[in-house]
Amino acid sequence: MSPSTGHAWRYWPRFWARFLRRRLPSSLWGRSLLIIILPVFLMQVAVTWAFFDAHWQTVTARLSEGLAGEIAWAVESYRDDPSPSNLATIADRAERSMQLSIALQEGRTLPDDRDSSVFGVVDRTINEALDSRLDDPFWFSTTDYPAYVDIQVQQPQGVLRIIAPRERAIATQGHIFVLWLTLATVLLMSVAILFIRNQVRAIERLAEAAEDFGRGIDAPRFRPSGAREVRSAARAFMDMRERIQRHIEQRTVLLASVSHDLRTPLTRLRLELALADQTRRTQAMQGDLDEMEHMIDEYLAFARGEAGEASQSIDLKALLEAIGAQIKKRGAKVEIVAPEPSVEARVRPLAFRRALTNLAGNAADHGGRVRLSLGRVGGGVEIAVEDDGPGIPEAQREDAFRPFSRLDDARNQNTKGVGLGLAIARDVARSHGGDITLDASDLGGLKAVIRLPG
């Protein structure tokens, strides 16, 4: 074997493996059906083939040979004495003893053609049996009459026509076996499909509950169901969900306390500065307090993430228009692109509004023109926020999502920022089952795209 041939043989298993992976169903439901249906189908094909090969064909061949022998007797008896009286005697005996109807069609010849049976093996078996017993030309048909076989033998006087019951030449009970086999297969497969569907549905409900929880949607009606292993996984998920929710509640209470404790001394300092003489020093301290309060708000918003907020369906176009109106107050030119009159999505309104406000605010801070686009892509929703500012180099775009990340001076003209705007926005998008990506904008600056699943 040459090296090229050996390489080809090694390639074929991988080729067929990839071919089967592409063609076979990828869902658990489809694969479960395949596991049940394919073996049953193969088994029934094997049983049917064995039945027809070992029983039906054998019985049909023996019946055909017996019928051919009786026809040969009738033909030879008539050839010995072709008188009408002898023909009548032969026909009477054949009718009473063999259930054969025999008649002479004088001056006739054999037909030129005939219709073949659906089961070619039937015609072949009868033809072989008649050919082995008859010396005269013959013709037969298994399709002209549903319950009979028409056999014609050429004689000098004409055609000797013999009509035999179909069960004398063919095993007619084969279709009954196939029918019962098919009904049993359909019944068993229906029961199997019903049970498999129930088990797969339990797994699907568990996956839906996990996805809803990841997107902040409560699923109070979820209950463990299905097989023991599936119920065990569902109970583990419910325990995990309770622990996460308890942790979020504790963190929210802690952050609320921290927020109150931090704001109290800031309020006292702001009041003391307001009562003090207004000098350059007090004005500088006032600016420091404003910046500190803004930083505290940013930190708490990032840590809290609006986790306790319930999801609800909102009109995203109306939300973009409201955010666009806010951005216009900063002096930026805002363009809203939304082909559809209304696009609904289920989100946590305050958290999602904050994420979009952060993106639009960043765009307004770094550019004079802002474009807000809304559309449907692949069954989901896509929102793009673009500006005509300096943008972010491709190598630094992923770094921009890190909390407290500050990039080069071109994107750091906003001195109030603490590097949490993009981090908060991505955290909100991912908590809804989506994500945010950065790219270059047609306007010349940065393009931030939020994608939400349908």
Image (cartoon, rainbow, N blue to C red):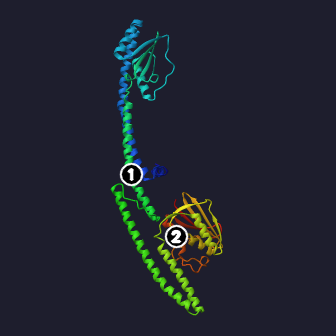
Q: Considering depth in this image, is 276 or 181 the residue closer to the camera?
A: 276
Neighbours of disc 1 within 10 Å: few (<14), some (14-19), many (20+): some
Amino acid type, mark 1: Asn
Q: Is residue 253 left or right of residue 408?
A: left
Please determine whether, in this image, residue 19 is positioned above or below residue 111: below
Left/right placement of residue 216 relative to residue 342 reads left
Label 2, on which residue?
350
For disc 1, the marked residue is 198
Secondary structure, mark 2, is helix
Residue 392 in sight: no
Label 1, secondary structure: give it: helix
Amino acid type indicated by mark 2: Leu
Q: Residue at x 61, y 75 (%)?
A: 365
Residue 145, given in percent of the width and then of the height, sits at: 45, 22
| Residue found 53% across the figure and 62% down from its top | 345
Give me the residue at 61% from left, 64% from top.
Answer: 373
Say the numbered circle drawn on residue 43: none
Q: Horizontal and vertical percent for residue 93? A: 35, 12
